[in-house]
Image (tube, grey):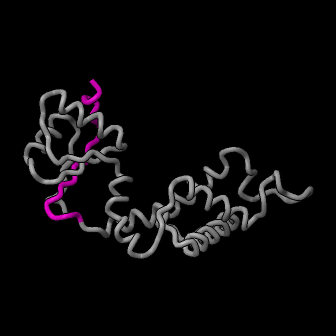
Amino acid sequence: MSDRVEFCSALSSLATVLTRYPWQTKYVIFPSPRQATVALHALARRGHGWVNAHGTGIARLASMLAEPAISQKGLTTLSPVMFEDLVERAWTAVEGPGPEGAKKGAKASPLGPRTPGAVEALARTLNDLRMGGVAQAELGKGAEALAAVYARYMKMLADGRSADRAVLFTAALAASLPAGTKLVFAGGMYDALS
């Protein structure tokens, strides 16, 4: 795939790549879709024409590449809100309700109190474990509570026929790009902001 990938760090190098492959479909990948829009518009304002260039973020590109395989397996991709909800339900299934529903005298959670932001922090932790390929069984001593929530999350993910970011990115890596498509990774294009 290396002949289908280009790297750019300035608008001038992006303009060169887009000119070099005028009729091929090009996915210009930025850290965020907003940055892609800003850079492509900056090119146009500076007189660099481009055709068939699609600015996107890496997550959007992964979704586009993975969606056919995920749909074929009958899975539903979790949105960030759905993912956090599933993590919260897994935590509740393992440890019971949070403080507002806990019985008087109930023991504190080994994962910490359910303060504002606690579910989001646990969700980021589970996402990091999944994206890093860490299995629940690999969590060491002292992480039993986390391992239990992780195991419940994985069961709920499978039972719900859902795909989280790890499934999405794994499917995207296995997907084939359409023939003639170029990936252009762009970063550090601070000249697009001026």
Is residue 67 in view from this perspective?
yes
* Number of numbered discs visible in the structure rendering: 0
Q: Is residue 99 left or right of residue 68?
A: right
Query: Can you give x and y, in whole percent of width and height, for residue 43 in the image?
Result: 19, 33
Q: Is residue 169 left or right of residue 101?
A: left
As drawn, the residue found furthest toward the top would be 194
Q: Quadrant of the N terminus?
A: bottom left
Is residue 131 in view from this perspective?
no
Q: Residue at x 17, y 48 (%)?
A: 52
Q: Residue at x 26, y 35 (%)?
A: 39
Q: Quadrant of residue 105?
A: bottom right
Q: Is residue 53 left or right of residue 105?
A: left
Q: Is residue 10 left or right of residue 139?
A: left
Q: Residue at x 29, y 27 (%)?
A: 193
Closer-to-camera residue (117/48): 48
Closer-to-camera residue (133/97): 97
Query: Can you give x and y, in whole percent of width and height, for residue 119 in the image?
Result: 65, 52
Query: Can you give x and y, in whole percent of width and height, for residue 76 in the image?
Result: 48, 66
Instruction: State whether residue 46 is above or below residue 35.
Output: above
Query: Can you give x and y, in whole percent of width and height, for residue 192 in the image?
Result: 26, 30
Q: Does the magenta portion include 31?
A: no
Q: Does the magenta portion include 191?
A: yes
Q: What segment carries the magenta color? A: 177-194
Q: Quadrant of the C terminus?
A: top left
Q: Residue at x 73, y 46 (%)?
A: 115
Q: Quadrant of residue 136?
A: bottom right
